[in-house]
Amino acid sequence: MNVPRIFLLGTAALLLTGATAEAQEACSSYTVRAGDNLRRIASKAYGDGDLYRRIYDANVAVIGEKADLIEIGSVLTIPCAEPTAEAAPEGVTPVSTAAANATPTSATTVSATAETQPAPVTERPLAIVTGNGYAPFADKTLPGGGMMTQLVEMAIFRADPSIPYTISFVSDWQAHIDALLPSGAYDLSFPWIRPDCEGAATLSPGDQARCNDFAFSGPFYEIVDAFFATRDSGLMAATSYAEFEGKRICRPEGYTAGVLDAAGLTSGVVTLVRAENVKECFRALASGEVDLVSVDSEVGDSTVAKLGLIATIGQNPHLSSILSLHVIAHKSNPRAVAMLGALDAGMIEMYESGEWYDIVSTALNQQRQSE
């Protein structure tokens, strides 16, 4: 990811960079060392880096309202671990520590607000929507709601810990861009691939509309968009996109077709099949209803494993594209578009602090262990 890196230097101030913190426990104090960040301190104290807000909320007077700098030698209070919460009602998924103790605003929505800095009553919390079935990036059954959910939450925290927000899981991805964002029901959605908006002449009508109507954050994560086929089809050995001509390619609803267009696999050259989700694409592949599935490799590998299809379906190692995942806002929503800039700034700080790497590596390790 090509994100600019800005480093703040000083003898007393420490940018929260990633390194191993000395052992600490809940119900104690901790002296900040070079290389600490809040996620790592929380992980050491509670066994869960997502509980970083618990430490921040207890130490606002020490850390400051903008949690980007702490001083080496600062003494932080490590709050006691709270009792294990009762099981949440069905459909309610706390996606972060900040959200875990908040009152859900709907059956599938949780709120996150820094308790020490309540939101102005004149402005509703930022409403964010993501979906399920997109492991390891987004799914309410994943730890922290998935890698992208954790990255977005940390970017908000880095931008301004007092920003109130809700995160909802709506599995109909196409509805995010067709209705939920344009209507103002939600402000932001993630994760989305940005079409090649600069190459407008080659875009499909759907991708052109996406470029015209939506604003995109900077890249949060790069993916390898790949093709999957049955192992006995011969398509796993293809080294040219021309070998896919005439094939039936399944790409889930909401996924841009731009990656196929860029490879010359346009309408008329191939038959594009749209399934409701990634699982349905792979089920269609296994049953012979389609010839190929086009999705990013990590999501594809995870889905194939969960469906027990590793012996029959694999990834073509020769043909793929590098794409990036973004947060989007409808251009008619000025506060949401402005928030994208704040998220970009938060992402830069996450790189500098090491928190981006912590979140990504932990999520990928958890994903591998579950397969």
Image (tube, rainbow, N blue to C red):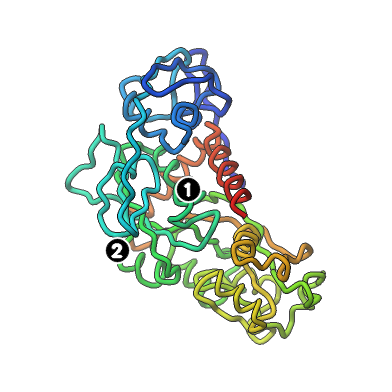
Query: Nearest the camera: 29 or 198?
Result: 29
Res 83 → quadrant: top left
Q: Position of residue 330 (x, y in %)?
A: 38, 62
User: Is residue 87 depicted above or below 235 in this figure?
Assistant: above
Circle 1 packing at 10 Å, graded few (<14), some (14-19), many (20+), is many
* Residue at the (69%, 69%) spot, across then down: 228
Closer to the eye: label 2 or 1: 1
Query: Nearest the camera: 117 or 138?
Result: 138
Compared across the picture, whether 338 is left or right of 196 comes to: left
* Residue at the (31%, 68%) spot, across then down: 183
Secondary element at image label 2: loop
Question: Mark 1 is on which residue type?
Answer: Pro
Q: Position of residue 76 (x, y in %)?
A: 39, 19
Res 136 → quadrant: bottom right
Res 85 → quadrant: top left
Compared across the picture, whether 160 is left or right of 278 comes to: left
Circle 2 packing at 10 Å, graded few (<14), some (14-19), many (20+), is few
Secondary element at image label 1: helix
Quadrant where the C terminus is found in the figure: bottom right
Question: Mark 2 is on which residue type?
Answer: Ala
User: Is residue 134 depicted above or below 247 in this figure?
Assistant: above
* Residue at the (39%, 60%) spot, across then down: 169
Q: Work out how far the residue at label 2 is from the one at label 1, CA to CA, in angstroms.
A: 26 Å
Residue under label 2, please give it.
185
Q: Position of residue 111 (x, y in %)?
A: 30, 48
Compared across the picture, whether 166 is left or right of 70 comes to: left
Earlier-in-chain disc, 2 versus 1: 1
Query: Nearest the camera: 191 or 330?
Result: 191
Compared across the picture, whether 157 is left or right of 14 comes to: left
Q: Position of residue 217 (x, y in %)?
A: 48, 52
Residue under label 1, please give it.
143
User: Is residue 197 depicted above or below 57 in this figure?
Assistant: below
